[in-house]
Image: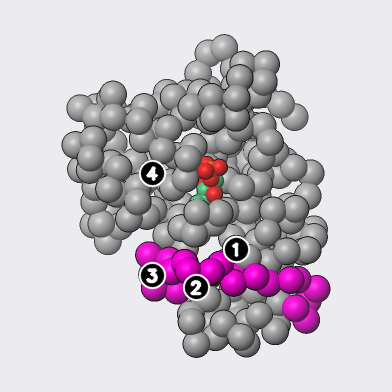
Amino acid sequence: MTQDELKAAVGQAATAYVLPGSVIGVGTGSTANHFIEALANMRGRIAAAVSSSEESTHRLRGHGITVLDANEVESLALYIDGADEIDYSGCMIKGGGGALTREKIVADLAERFICIADESKLVRTLGSYPLPVEVIPMARSLIARRLRAIGGKPVLREGFLTDNGCVILDVHGLAITDPPEMERELTQWPGVVTIGVFARNRASACLLGTHHQRLFPHDTTDTAGLGLPSGEERIE
Ligand code: 5RP
């Protein structure tokens, strides 16, 4: 199977977790797009979606799926989204598509986050993928200097503004050995909107597409009662 076929397979498999009549959180990126395609075939069965980007909102509405503003919901049972990297504890790097802040907001609204990813995304330690940091434009140089001071090599994502009108610094060369601590520390810096480490909002489970054409729920923090679809296995 190609990487895209693996993404499509987990996108399809994720629909098994969607409760009929529910409002569901929907992520951003090529894997999430496959989930949106799969969701389109069951649009009569969900009430609405809360989206993590203008791009996903556009796609969802294109399929006739109602998209609610995040301010209209108190909580979501489930958020489905991809990742750039995920470790064995469910911590992730996200934001390759630049939607990290809205993704973190939707993840925070959700009781459960199921990450959908092809097997290349599973890592022992986060950080090979450059860490996206969303920054208010006037703080760009300040934050870049501070990132260099902790050993990172920040690169401005040229010609790109987030849905929130901010810039992204992609930080190379950081070994993220303590994701919760890095998230806590960097998100306190004035000018940082958020960073692409998802530790506080780590995945509850990961549907991992592998070349053996199997989908593996990656058991992380709170899969008890998740109701794993049949034919799937856990990896430890
Ligand atoms: C977007 C994201 C995506 O989930 C992440 O970049 C993975 O993308 P893809 O599914 O295309 O590999 O965080 O901001």
Assign a secondary structure to mark 3.
Answer: loop
Q: Which residue: 44% across, 47% down?
A: 28
- The residue singled out by tag 3 in the image is 164
- Span colored in magenta: 148-169
Give how far across and how far down residue 95 sits, in percent: 54, 56
Q: Mark 1 points at which residue?
A: 132
- Counting residues from the N terminus, which is met first, the one under dot 2 or under dot 1? 1
User: Mark 4, mark 1: which one is toward the viewer?
Assistant: 1
**Tag 2, which secondary structure?**
strand
Q: Mark 4 points at which residue?
A: 26
Which residue does the numbered mark 2 point to in the structure image? 167
Crowd tier of the residue under label 1, counting other residues whose Cα lies within 10 Å: few below 14, some 14–19, many 20 or above = many
Report if residue 154 lies within the magenta region: yes
Of the residues shown, which amino acid type is indicated by label 1? Pro
Residue 53 x %, y %: 37, 55
Spot the residue most to the top. Answer: 231
The type of residue carrying mark 4 is Val
Mark 3: is the Cβ under 8 angstroms from ligand 1?
no
- Amino acid at circle 3: Asn
The answer to which image quadrant residue 222 occupies is top right
